[in-house]
């Protein structure tokens, strides 16, 4: 926790991603984002992790969605084609966890505006949204561009010319 009560603690609400977090897949950016939590955690700031694989659709459906993405659908349309919402994640449990810790005001380590909006609606004030690094590579460039375009994620994708090569 922050030593200064005026400075909200930095937290990351991380949605589990087996392929990225455990297997190191470069298809998504979740694994590197999880690694960013390490320094914050060691500094006494937390990072609740939620079992919300594949934007809330589960591991097996996420693997099916990967196949649809390989066939040309973007990540949101793949979920819709499988009968799920574009992003079914729910941050109620995260808000409850933060509340149990006595935190009703945080700085959120995230590029996702929906995550911040849900926390605000659930009674956790997001005083600041701190973006994660952009973990762009040739494999995930289209995925990240989709997150930025359709999901309004805060991502500057002009790094290293990778996106230009993929677009």
Image (spheres, grey):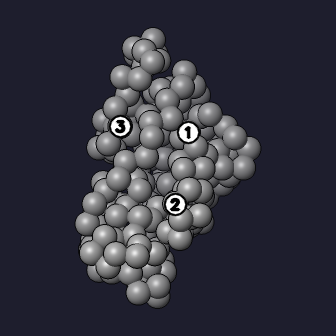
Q: Determine which quarter of the picture holds residue 4.
A: bottom left
Residue 43: horizontal and vertical position, in percent? 53, 65
- 3D distance between C-alphas at marks 1 and 3: 13 Å
Q: Residues within 10 Å of mark 2 (few under 14, many from 20)?
A: some
Looking at the image, which is closer to me, 59 or 134?
Answer: 134
Q: Is residue 108 above or below residue 7?
A: above
SS of the residue at dot 2? helix
Please give the label number shown on residue 28: 1
- Image: 80 above or below 6: above
Q: Residue at x 66, y 49 (%)?
A: 21
Q: Are marks 1 and 2 in contact (CB under 8 Å)?
A: no
| C-alpha separation, residue under disc 1 versus residue under disc 2 | 22 Å
Residue drawn at the location 41% of the way across and 23% of the way down: 159
Q: Would you name the residue on which mark 2 appears?
A: 40
Looking at the picture, does residue 137 appear above or below residue 80?
Answer: above
Percent from the top left, x then y, of residue 49?
A: 57, 66
């Amino acid at each position: 926790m922050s030593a200064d009560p005026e400075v909200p603690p930095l937290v990351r609400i991380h949605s589990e991603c087996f392929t990225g977090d455990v297997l190191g897949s470069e298809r998504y950016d979740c694994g590197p984002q999880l690694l960013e939590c390490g320094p914050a955690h060691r500094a006494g700031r937390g990072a609740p992790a939620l079992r919300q694989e594949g934007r809330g659709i589960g591991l097996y459906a996420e693997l099916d969605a990967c196949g649809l993405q390989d066939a040309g659908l973007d990540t949101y349309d793949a979920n819709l084609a499988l009968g799920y919402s574009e992003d079914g994640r729910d941050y109620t449990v995260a808000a409850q966890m933060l509340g149990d810790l006595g935190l009703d005001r945080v700085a959120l380590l995230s590029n996702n505006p929906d995550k911040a909006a849900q926390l605000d609606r659930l009674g956790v004030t997001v005083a600041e949204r701190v973006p994660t690094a952009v973990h762009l590579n040739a494999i995930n460039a289209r995925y990240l561009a989709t997150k930025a375009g359709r999901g309004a994620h805060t991502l500057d994708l002009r790094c290293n010319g990778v996106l230009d090569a993929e677009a």
